Amino acid sequence: TNVSAVWDFDSAEAGTGADIENAIAAARADGIVLEREYRQQRLIPAFMEPRSIVADPTGDQLTVWSSTQVPHFVRIFLALVLGIPESKIRVIAPDVGGGFGGKLQFTPEEVLTVIAARRAGKPCKYTETRSESLQAAHHGRDQWQKLTLAATKDGTVTGLKVELLANMGAYLGLITSAIPILGAFMYNGVYKFPAYHLRLTNVFTNLAWTDAYRGAGRPEATYAIERIMDELAAELGVDPLEIREKNWIRHDEFPFTTVCGLEYDTGNYEAATEQAKQTFGYDALRAEQQRRRDSGDPVQLGIGVSTFTEMCGLAPSRWFGSMGYVGGGWEAASIRMLPTGKVEVITGTSPHGQGHVTAWSQIVADRLGVPFDDVEVLHGDTQIAPRGLDSYGSRSLVVGGMAVLAAADKVIEKARPIAAHLLEANADDLEFAAGRFGVKGTESGLGLGEVAFAVFQAHNMPTGTEPSLDSDATFDPETFSYPHGTHLCAVEVDTETGAAKIRNYTCVDDVGKVVNPMIVEGQVHGGLAQGIAQALFEEAVYDDSGTLVTGSFVDYLVPSAADLPSYSTDRRETPSTTNPLGVKGVGEAGTIASPPAVANAVMDALAPLGIMHIDMPLTPARVWQAIQDAKGRS
């Protein structure tokens, strides 16, 4: 058999909800049952920079430069596979040209490059071509979803049953089999479903391996539930926003334990939706849509809705352990106070476009009261930052940023008794603000830089105090964080050609407290581009012999800026209670929410023709063919 694994979740057995079969039976007797099948096409991460590796075996240690998201994992696995002590391996991830999950991997090429270098006794380099990258780097998505939704006659959902088939490819990567499990906890989305059951079947095939691609399980689940909620609204003849409002978790019900057993700490779906609706001009667009339908306009207007939440900040470690993962979910950071008062931050996260250097500098500058330009962030080198679990799963700020914050707090607490000694005051009488220790009720005080220089001199230290302010911290959160948002999309579909063009895209995301608005904006824009790409453009296609047909950018259609709309993006802030800064996560939000928003808009435009569903990508050819088939039926 080619079955890799079977995994079940049942809310009745888990004690988190009611029995799904009873819910479906009751709905069949006196309610509504929808049975739908959706397809998540295979995608390729298509990062800007193909993978490249240099291995240098000369000297006392093996040094490997790799275009990777996970230098710490690469070091661990090289040590295990080659039998070399970790202390003799240095992995450096230089400025990495994108990853999107596609470089969250320990690859055969890394092992082979090291072996070749060791046999030759000199540095060896491997750089793949774009075609090699599209074929050999792991792919994403590739699932078949069968949903059975039970609801009352007024549209209140009473249960959801999911049968999920996931294509692993030819072999497993670091977290291949975990991707659909992550999605399994998100099929209830923002809704209060009383009963839930999911059966997951992972299968091997003779195609390229699959693993994490931006969103990693959450886009798949969000697409399915948001599509079927739209179909429930159509079945009842009500507005898609109305059916969502009837079923979602209200802001006064948080914290809320879902039917999957997750505890959502905070959220306000009503506020995000209302703000998005006003910015989008929802009512005016609905009125325009009706006028165009009445006039028989060949270019029809469709309006799509997507309300989502996601579990991100992948941790805590004990959750990873309960799911059978080998690794943990913690993150490490160190802060070095230099004699000049400048600060070095060493982080275990490994950025590749997320802006960690800026954000971590902001956190430290704000906490320690030092100038932003006096903070230097070091990363991506296992010799400089020996402890870390790298960057993926929207976890860097929520986990890694909290480790940086904790290390900064330790610096302050280490400096406090030294400052008190220098000021001849009691440590309890000191206040720390704006980078300065002050004695309460007096003008007396010392700046943190002054304390750092005094520690460097060590001429006048309290007895028994080590002359160092350097601090290490490891943060392992108690639970996930849950960003959410509402995305609205207006699409014009030419019924004569099948071409779909996005006219307006509005999203309001709640990512908790925002550290850097520009970085958040960039992450949302990038995520939207990749989500819209899945909805309208991209698909990895194989022929019957197992050869990748879309092996270059001639055939694998990555959209350019000219293919994408301008976005209207905004934010709300509902602080998370799971970490000291109240942050959530943002790196994958756009990719999770946008495919159903776009697909729902296209289906809404085609609804007068009786077309209920077309599998992604919604290319002109597919849409045109669906229109012809509908005309043939009529």
Image: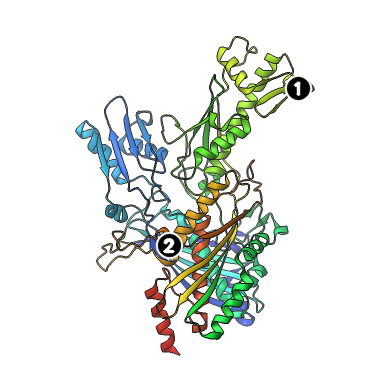
| Observer able to see residue 599 | yes
Task: Name the residue furthest left.
Answer: 120
- Secondary structure at badge 1 equals helix
Mark closer to the chain start, 1 or 2? 1
Left or right placement of residue 145 versus residue 210 in this view: right
Q: Quadrant of residue 5?
A: bottom left
Q: Position of residue 406 (x, y in %)?
A: 60, 34
Q: Position of residue 6 (x, y in %)?
A: 44, 61
Quarter that holds the C terminus: bottom left
Viewer-closest of 401 and 325: 401
Q: Quadrant of residue 283?
A: bottom right
Rendered image: mark on residue 116: none
Quarter that holds the N terminus: bottom left
Left or right placement of residue 61 versus residue 599 in this view: left
Q: Position of residue 541 (x, y in %)?
A: 32, 65
Up-down relation of residue 56 to residue 229 (above or below): above
Question: Which residue is labeled 1 in the image?
Answer: 429
Measuring 50% from the left and 75% from the top, which residue is drawn there? 603
Up-down relation of residue 608 to residue 546 (above or below): below
- Secondary structure at badge 2 equals helix
- Give the crowd class for mark 1: few <14, some 14-19, many >=20 residues within 10 Å: few
Viewer-closest of 187 and 631: 631
Viewer-closest of 250 and 288: 288
Up-down relation of residue 270 to residue 314 (above or below): below
Report, in whole angstroms, how far the alpha carbon at label 1 lies from the one at label 2: 58 Å
Left or right placement of residue 76 versus residue 9 in this view: left
Question: Which residue is labeled 2 in the image?
Answer: 533
Q: Amino acid at mark 2?
A: Ala
**Which mark's residue is nearer the viewer, 1 or 2?**
2
Measuring 49% from the left and 64% from the top, which residue is drawn there? 595
Left or right placement of residue 539 versus residue 25 in this view: left
